[in-house]
Amino acid sequence: MGLHTSGTVLAGTSPAAPAVSRGYAWVVFALSFGLLLSDYMSRQVLNAVFPLLKAEWLLSDARLGSLSGIVALMVGVLTFPLSLLADRWGRVRCLVIAATVWSLATLGCALSASYDQMFLGRLMVGVGEAAYGSVGIAVVLSVFPVGLRATLSGAFIGGGAFGSVLGVSIGGVVGQHLGWRWAFGVMGIFGLVLAALYGIVVTEKRLRSASRATHGGSAHAVRGTSAHATHGGSAERAPIRSLLPRLVSSVSVVCAYIGSGLQMFIAMALLAWMPTFLHRYYSMPTAKAGLVAGVFALITGVGMIGGGMVADRVSRRSGAAKWTVATACSLGSFVLLTAGFQLPTGAPQLVLIGAGALLSNATAGPAAAMVANLTPAAIAATAMATLTLANSLLGLAPGPAVTGALADHVGLLGALRAVPLVAVAAGVAFTIGKCFYEKDLRRLGMLSDVALRTPEPRS
């Protein structure tokens, strides 16, 4: 397979099969994916019981939004340092501790007697979940051949949406029939069981042997393939500290961070407030609102996977085409969501909102690919942590909270009509990134001029 911008060969990799059986590798994936589902189920179950909490504690929409936003804020703030800690102290150990923390914190939310206690519990949920995305995918990639990385990464990105579907749907049903406390309790128990199983089955020793087999022949594998590969060996040997400035050393990579984060603002606002929107404007009971909102979350997840697949296909001749896909998704979500929330309640409105949700976070795959292309492979996990930081601080944290604050002043429908405007700013960021992309690749020595012009031969 030839070298091109959409599939840049990373330094420090080789196609060698890891030193674990295929069966064990898929067990690691299944358990890691299960913890990812638990992560998002514990995070999003709150959204399904918003109406119940509002009625019991007489909370404003702004306070409800803050209970959702604090989790994303802690994820954003702590992802980077905790990812570095996991690389040094042991990824499996850190993952088990993290899952235990967010599960116990979720059980604590079930016992909360006031908004302040719930806020503290949600804060600790965020602390536990902070680095799971970046560290969890690093564990999975270490036990699979390099050729499966794109597929596995896409599955992990979409897995968050599927976990959100389960969290909102199961939380809504359990909340209506057993009360909101049991909704949190079920999620917490599920996480604790998975954390214990993960700690028993996945071990640091087996992961280290797999990593040595996967990366041991890196110098030979990448020698002479491209400018990126040519410089890759020195990059791999360079101290991590000297490579960290490359995380923000180009206009295009900064635009990828910003565009991804802003688009995440819209996706998270929809995810957090759809159950309440359906409850208020469609008079759906809590359980039904949670199930229907879960469908919208599932549509968002499908869009995330589909966006990455489309971007890979159209960028076979030019890696810069990924930026075009991201821009189109941003502006498409703006048009569809704006039109949808302007319509009166009914099936046409839900169809347009669903179409907008499909595109609302379809930029996640293209943005992650651009970040990977623009940063050294030696700090790939840290680059993903930086992207997570941008997503959290620009999107996941403020999305629910700002929407709730607006809803207190102009109503929830008015707030949801304003939210899609953020997609315009995201589209502008992606457009600027595309303008600088190829120039930044050349300047950083990430790709040769020949590779920029050469399409990938079909396998």
Image: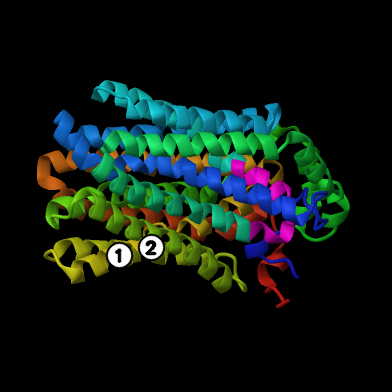
In the rendered view, would you say 351 is above or below 54?
A: below
Near-viewer residue (335 or 173): 173
For the residue carrying disc 1, how many other residues have a C-alpha within 10 Å: few (<14), some (14-19), or many (20+)? many
Question: Circle 2 sits in a helix, a strand or a loop, which is it?
Answer: helix
Kindly report the secondary structure that dominates the magenta region of the rendered protein. helix
The question of residue 139 being in magenta is answered with yes
Measuring from the top left, give residue 53's x and y in whole percent: 21, 35
Near-viewer residue (344 or 424): 344
**Image point (43%, 63%), residue name:** 303
Q: Which colour assignment does the render follow?
A: rainbow
**Image point (73%, 66%), residue name:** 3
Measuring from the top left, give residue 191's x and y in whole percent: 50, 37
- Left or right, 433 with reference to 185: right
Amino acid type assigned to the residue bearing label 1 in the image: Gly
Say whether disc 2 or disc 1 marks the residue closer to the N-terminus: 2
Question: Circle 1 sits in a helix, a strand or a loop, which is it?
Answer: helix
Measuring from the top left, give residue 82's x and y in whole percent: 57, 29
Q: Which mark is residue 354?
A: 1
Q: Which residues are magenta?
A: 136-150
**Image point (38%, 34%), residue name:** 185
The question of residue 346 being in magenta is answered with no
Q: Which mark is residue 299?
A: 2
Figure label count: 2
Label 2 to label 1: alpha-carbon separation = 7 Å
Measuring from the top left, give residue 367's x and y in whole percent: 51, 55
**Image point (13%, 55%), residue name:** 283
Q: Which mark is residue 193?
A: none
In the rendered view, would you say 168 is above or below 83?
A: below
Classify the position of the C terminus by image quarter: bottom right
Classify the position of the N terminus by image quarter: bottom right
